[in-house]
Image: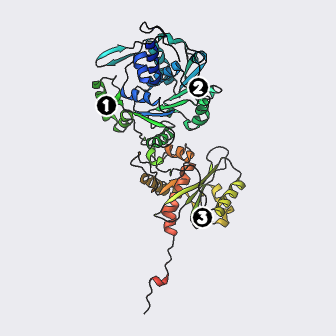
Amino acid sequence: MSLLKDSNNLEPESLLNKVLLGLGEEDPIFFAEYFLGLHLNPFQKRFLLTLTKYNQILSVTANQVGKTVAIAIAHIWWNFYKKGFSGNPELIEKAHFETLNISPISRQSKEAFRDIEEILNSNFSWEEGGERYINDCKIKWFWEAKNENLGRIDFSNNSSCFCLSTSEDKGAGFAGKQFALISYDECVQSFHLREELPARIFSRTAKYSGTIILNATPDELAKSQQYWYHLYTDAKRGEGEWHLVEGLYDENIFIPEKKREEYKERLRKLDPIKYKQVILGEFIASAERMFTPEMVEGLWNGRDKPTSVILDRDYVIIIDWGIAESGDETVILVADVTEFENQAEIVYAYSKQGGDPVELMAMASYLNLEFNSAPIVMDTTEMGGIIFKKMLERCKPISFGQGNKPDALFYLQVRLRNNIRKDLTNSEKSAMGKLRSYYLPKLEEQLSSYKLDDKKIKQDWVMVLAMLCWYVDKYKTITQVKVYPLTKFYKSP
């Protein structure tokens, strides 16, 4: 544990000094207010308190709630006490220690860098109650040096904090380093958040079993918005490993109330939908997107693995062929469509980029045999689909043509709308939804970005799902012939 030096003329080894240091180590709010000389808003206090209880924190907030300042405080606190280190205090003082703050946006990573520097040098300013304040940091000596090119701040106890942009390398620039704390600011802006988390972020905390903070305001145009919503809904229900911290614009008491109200009124008139995102931190969808975050999230049934075949149940196989080395994949879905209130549940999914046609047909034939001689529905819009249909003639495949697409998308949208969960705090999954699936990341990604003008976007997973809805809601309904025993209508004399 670092020793307080030259604070209020106290001797470093005095009893009072040790008591204050102990309080600061256990309570980050006290540390921020007493040692750093800061005032905190309600969200910042709530956020800092979670650092003492959880090591995976999901911060989903409105705009301008002071979340980047809260992250800066967390890094100072972590480095000052070298959180996670144990043993001889003198040896801990000499040991090298590092934390990391990253962001997909270079400007955002530099914000935390600047906040740390200003706080430790008593240059951090804010407005409160009509007055302007500047912090009085009691541990200025803790600041050692900075290297803006490397994005590194060095502290006097041989610890460092890096504030860097992930750019487009999925965090590969951090290879080989280990950090006791990693915060990912505005992570929703990442192009590949799902891929980064296990391989590039969690792996960088393995040495310390370190704390990870994901922090962002929802953004309907962000590439990782749907995955961010997926993490949010699980945390909201108290499921998974993430602890949720939410924050509202009105909690930032450092923006004068009059200015807050003026801004809210202007934004409400300009864009009522955007108001929900900026002021309340809610998830919204742009008008061009066909499926909202709530519609996509309502598809998942709580499982993350396929389900084995069950005898005496009805299945259907849906195929969208794609054999080019680039472009759309071949995607195959198997769904349980045993008639019960017209439900359909995906139990198996397979995809392959640029596969051998013989291999792909063998997979289709295998699934047909495995899943109780399930009928096969395939896209025959292109010549390749027609050839595949002829080659699989023994399976009596059902054709899906271009003219069926509008109906298929309509049926898909209706089913997903009916799946929306009204209460995210309810731990019950979408068990009663008429379209369900185990969690499929590629399907999630394509649904979240799908637009009616789909010529330049990946759509293969969306189309097989739409084909499934078309099969259940139209084809199966029209072609299914009900057979009634004659005894039902015949009465003996």
Residue type at numbered disc 1: Lys
3D distance between C-alphas at marks 2 and 1: 39 Å
3D distance between C-alphas at marks 1 and 3: 55 Å
Mark 3 — residue? 375
Q: Residues within 10 Å of mark 3 (few under 14, many from 20)?
A: many
Residue type at numbered disc 2: Phe
Tell me: residue 385, above or below residue 261: below
Q: Using residue 38 as the reference point, say whether residue 94 is left or right of it.
A: right
Can you tell which mark lies on residue 264? 1
Whichever of labels 1 and 3 marks the residue nearer the N terminus, that label is 1
| Marks 2, 1: nearer the viewer | 2
Whichever of labels 3 and 2 marks the residue nearer the N terminus, that label is 2
Which residue is more in the foreground, 157 or 322?
157
Residue 56 lies, in percent from the top left, at 51, 34
Residue 489 lies, in percent from the top left, at 44, 84
The residue shown at (67%, 61%) is: 365
Which residue is more in the foreground, 213 or 433?
213
Tell me the SS state at disc 1. helix
Residue type at numbered disc 3: Pro
Q: Is residue 218 visible?
A: no
Q: How is the image coloured?
A: rainbow
Q: Using residue 374 as the reference point, say whether residue 138 is left or right of it.
A: left
- From the image, which quarter does the C terminus lie in? bottom left
Residue at the far top in the pictured view: 9
Mark 2 — residue? 179
Which residue is more in the foreground, 217 or 180?
180
Whichever of labels 2 and 1 marks the residue nearer the N terminus, that label is 2
Does the CB distance between marks 2 and 1 fall below 8 Å? Answer: no
The residue shown at (45%, 13%) is: 15
Tell me the SS state at disc 2. loop
